[in-house]
Amino acid sequence: MDKSALFTFSSGLYVVSASDGERQSGCVVNTGLQLTSEPLQVMVAVNKGNFTEQVIESAGHFALTPLTQEADMVHIGRFGFRTGADFDKYPEPVRRTSLGDPYEEKCAAAVLTCSVRQTLDVGTHVVFVGEVVDAEVLSKAEPLTYAYYHSVLKGKTPPKASSFVG
């Protein structure tokens, strides 16, 4: 089987974040997707080994911010290559959604405030289906695609990413 066929899928890069009132975290994912328009729902897949997955489970809601091409590897690394278990990715002051989830405006095209409606255990990851309860456009900059991340920024796919092929 040629697993590189999966590299032809088009996707963006997103930061998914949550706060359960005691803990907060966020991580980079490449699996944000609109599922339905009525009700308006999106999904994200988060690795079970990510601290952010635990916080989303506990909170029952999350924020999803599509990144823009303005994001550099330092910004992506802040959310994608460090764990929120021992690194505060959202130092004060921090912007929060109406449900209390932190988000970073810098390098973000928009922010979606989502209430978890369903979860699906898919092995290494949990898929969260969130109903969008609020949304705001933050920038008109071009969205950061996974292809741009690889070809222009020369980013690598970390082992916890849903698209990692070993």
Image (cartoon, rainbow, N blue to C red):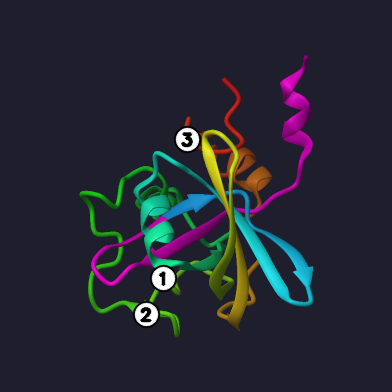
Of residues 4 and 42, which is closer to you in this image? 42
State which mark lies toward you, 3 or 1: 3
Q: Amino acid at mark 1?
A: Glu
Magenta stretch bounds: 1-26
Of residues 147 and 118, which is closer to you in this image? 118
Tell whether label 3 touches label 2 (CB within 8 Å): no
Disc 2 secondary structure class: strand
Disc 3 secondary structure class: loop
Q: Position of residue 20 (x, y in %)?
A: 33, 68
Q: Pointer 1: what residue?
A: 104
Q: Is residue 17 magenta?
A: yes
Q: Position of residue 43 (x, y in %)?
A: 64, 59
Q: Position of residue 149 (x, y in %)?
A: 59, 45
Q: Pointer 2: what residue?
A: 95
Disc on the earlier residue, 2 or 1: 2
Q: Pointer 3: what residue?
A: 160
